[in-house]
Amino acid sequence: MEDFPSWERGNRVEYPALRGSKQADVAIIGGGLTGLSLAAMLAGNGLRVILLEDRRLACGASWACTGKVTAQLGSIYRTVADSAGIACAQSYARMAISAVREVEDTCRRLNLDCALRRQDTYLFARCEADVPALEAVFQLEKELGLPVLRSSD
């Protein structure tokens, strides 16, 4: 197994260990996707940020991700709707849409070279037996206000 994702090979930057005392408005512990995003957002708003990571940036769960940012979370909305109600699932969907927009806005505002681009998501059935489950996901995401369409719509 490689120690860095193939889609990022050659782009790894090493940072020095923190030595001595430093002044900052905010200290963030953890340099994964969440910590890095928060650091960029806060720094972009003028705060002095120190990011602390014990290994390398984006090394844990962030290392194994595809880099995709989406509000289309598949069966997760069904789980939320079934356990907490449709209103809670709608709130979750609104927050997910807002988070995607915030990532887009932050990348633009900070002029980050992050290869950000919008891409339609296509769900397809591998066999006829998959169709009812995909239809249920589509109907729920539509009910929750996500921007989903059928290819025939």
Image (cartoon, helix red, strand yellow):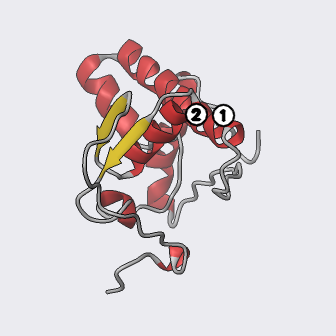
Q: Locate the C terminus and report the quarter of the image it occupies.
A: top right
Identified by mark 2, the residue type is Gly
In this view of the protein, which residue sits in the foreground, 123 or 7?
7
Callout 2 crowding tier (Cα within 10 Å): few <14, some 14–19, many ≥20: some
Callout 1 crowding tier (Cα within 10 Å): few <14, some 14–19, many ≥20: few
At horizontal 26% and vertical 19% (from top left) the residue drawn is 84
Judge from the rendering whether residue 37 lies leftward or rightward of residue 113; answer left or right: left
Q: Residue furthest bottom?
A: 1
Judge from the rendering whether residue 80 lies leftward or rightward of residue 103; answer left or right: left
Dot 2 lies on which element? helix
Q: x, y percentage for residue 136?
A: 47, 38
Is residue 75 visible in the rendered structure shown here? no
Identified by mark 1, the residue type is Asp
Q: x, y percentage for residue 39?
A: 44, 39
Dot 1 lies on which element? helix
Which residue carries the number 2 mark? 44
